[in-house]
Amino acid sequence: MSKMRLKKGDTVEVIAGRDLGKQGKILKVDPVHNKVTIEGINRARKHQRPTRALPQGGILNVETPMSASSVMLVCTKCQDPTRVGIMYLDNGEKVRTCKKCGEVID
């Protein structure tokens, strides 16, 4: 199992599937199953029975998890989807970097 280099709050672009080319922010990361949930992407319709929390019930649109291999991180500097590299700073801190421009991501 490879390590996930995506974090909650990252902006990503979908590179495969029905939402190809769309961008969104990561809401949830599941490293055990290698899945990410992205805001406004991979939506499904869920039939909800009325409850106390949702007294009306009805059909809801919810974001469902998708494979992390189907998304690429969008660099904050060059605004392009890129692969993520790992670099160690002089003080021993480990940071993520953009493979295209070399900019530190976080």
Image: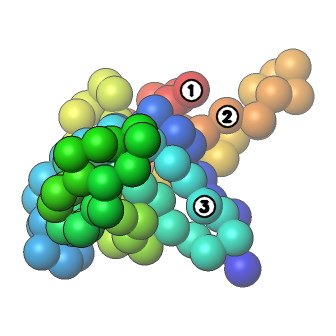
What residue is shown at x 34% (from left), y 28% (from top)? Answer: 76
Cα distance between the residues tagged 3 and 1: 20 Å
The answer to whether residue 66 is left or right of residue 15 is right
- Residue 30, labelled with which disc? 3
Q: What amino acid is labelled 1 in the image?
A: Asp
Q: Residues within 10 Å of mark 1 (few under 14, many from 20)?
A: few
Residue 66 location (% of width, % of height): 38, 70
Q: Nearer the viewer, mark 3 or mark 1?
A: 3
Q: What amino acid is labelled 2 in the image?
A: Val
How many labels, in total? 3
Q: Earlier in the sequence, mark 2 or mark 1?
A: 2
What residue is shown at x 29% (from left), y 61% (from top)? Answer: 48
Q: For mark 1, what is the residue? A: 106
- Residue 95, labelled with which disc? 2
Depth check: 97 or 70 in front? Answer: 70
The C terminus sits in image quarter: top right
What residue is shown at x 39% (from left), y 50% (from top)? Answer: 51
Cα distance between the residues tagged 3 and 2: 20 Å
What residue is shown at x 76% (from left), y 35% (from top)? Answer: 94
- SS for tag 3? strand
Residue 81 location (% of width, % of height): 28, 50
- Residue 9 vertical placement versus 82 (above, below): above
Q: Earlier in the sequence, mark 3 or mark 1?
A: 3
Any part of residue 15 in sight: no
Residue 9 location (% of width, % of height): 46, 33
Q: What amino acid is labelled 3 in the image?
A: Asp
The answer to whether marks 2 and 1 mark residues whose Cβ atoms lie closer than 8 Å is yes
